[in-house]
């Protein structure tokens, strides 16, 4: 029994190393812990009092796929391969155009507005859930209008699941490695066919669409969300590199009311992994094997 308990303790200790959030990085005023997370004053008031906050649980019995007026992303001006700049933002790794203050040449249209791809970033684990099931990670493609006087944002999200072999598109993003551990560290990522990625992802025809918010401070509302339920595999080495780089970076789900007043998005608390590992160690130590 002692041998089994010791083995399980080692396993859970290993999981803690993989899932633990790195030490707080200098320059960050907010985070995802009980001390600086979404329920604390480290996040703006709107994050707690807003009525259209994201992320949410997508109940497939209440959502329809492909609703709305979003058009197929236009990738006609994007080269077959593209070079990105990957930057460590502290709580995520963001991929942007290598040219300062420039959009990536992919656009989509919705409700008469044209949105340009500003960049994309990752969250681990996924922030959205489908029928209360989350994935290992989620990538958000952030589109913005070019007008600074009337800035509008649309986000396209895809789920990632760790697997022995990853999607060619996802693997190519990690080919040059991730940025260093410090905020502002960056690396050039070359040869990415991101246009083909959008073509192969059903062009948002399967996406769940809803009005929501930024999932990080300042939690601004009015965003047009498109959550594609299609899950892409990310290789285990790439996934572990991502986790070690950004740690836990998923906001808690938000309780929302639909127009009929029926509550169907349930607020959940993020379980502190270290506490969970400690509790599970106690359970297995007391078990009779």
Image (tube, helix red, strand yellow):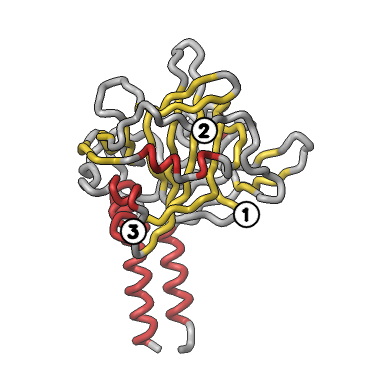
Mark in the foreground, 1 or 3: 3
The quadrant the N terminus occupies is bottom left
Residue placed under numbered mark 3 in the picture: 235
- Note whether residue 49 is visible: no
Mark number, residue 72: 2
Asked whether the beta carbons under mark 1 and mark 3 sit within 8 Å of each other, the answer is no
Distance of label 2 from label 1 (alpha carbons): 26 Å
For the point 28% across and 35% down, which residue is it? Answer: 82
Image location of residue 68, percent across then percent down: 64, 32
Neighbour class for label 2 at 10 Å: few (<14), some, many (≥20)? some
Neighbour class for label 3 at 10 Å: few (<14), some, many (≥20)? many
Mark in the foreground, 2 or 1: 2
For the point 21% across and 37% down, which residue is it? Answer: 188
Image location of residue 48, percent across then percent down: 57, 34
Neighbour class for label 1 at 10 Å: few (<14), some, many (≥20)? few
For the point 46% across and 42% down, which residue is it? Answer: 37
Mark in the foreground, 2 or 3: 2
Mark number, residue 179: none
Identify whether 248 is placed above or below 93. below
Residue placed under numbered mark 1 in the picture: 131
The front one of 90 and 42 is 90
């Amino acid at each position: 029994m002692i041998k089994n308990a010791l083995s399980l303790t080692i396993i859970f200790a290993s999981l803690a190393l993989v899932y633990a959030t790195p030490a707080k990085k200098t320059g960050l005023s907010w985070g995802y812990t009980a001390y600086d997370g979404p329920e604390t004053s480290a996040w703006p008031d709107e994050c707690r009092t807003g009525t259209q906050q994201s992320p949410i649980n997508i109940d497939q019995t209440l959502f329809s796929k492909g609703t709305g007026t979003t058009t197929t992303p236009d990738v006609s001006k994007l080269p077959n391969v593209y070079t990105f700049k990957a930057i460590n933002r502290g709580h995520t790794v963001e991929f942007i155009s290598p040219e300062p203050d420039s959009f990536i040449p992919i656009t989509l249209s919705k409700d008469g507005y044209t949105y340009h791809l500003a960049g994309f970033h990752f969250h681990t684990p996924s922030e959205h859930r489908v029928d209360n099931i989350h994935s290992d990670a989620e990538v958000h493609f952030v589109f913005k209008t070019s007008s600074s006087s009337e800035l509008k944002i649309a986000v396209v999200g895809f789920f990632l699941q760790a697997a022995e072999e990853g999607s060619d598109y996802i693997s190519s993003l990690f080919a040059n490695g991730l940025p260093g551990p410090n905020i502002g560290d960056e690396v050039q990522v070359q040869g990415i066919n991101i246009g083909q990625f959008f073509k192969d992802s059903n062009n948002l025809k399967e996406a769940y669409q809803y009005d929501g918010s930024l999932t990080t401070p300042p939690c601004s509302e009015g965003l047009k969300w498109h959550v594609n339920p299609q899950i892409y595999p990310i290789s285990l080495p790439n996934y572990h590199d991502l986790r070690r780089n950004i740690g836990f970076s998923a906001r808690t789900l938000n309780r929302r009311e639909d127009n009929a007043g029926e509550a169907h998005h349930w607020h959940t608390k993020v379980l502190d992994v270290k506490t969970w590992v400690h509790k599970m160690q106690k359970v297995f130590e007391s078990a009779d094997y």
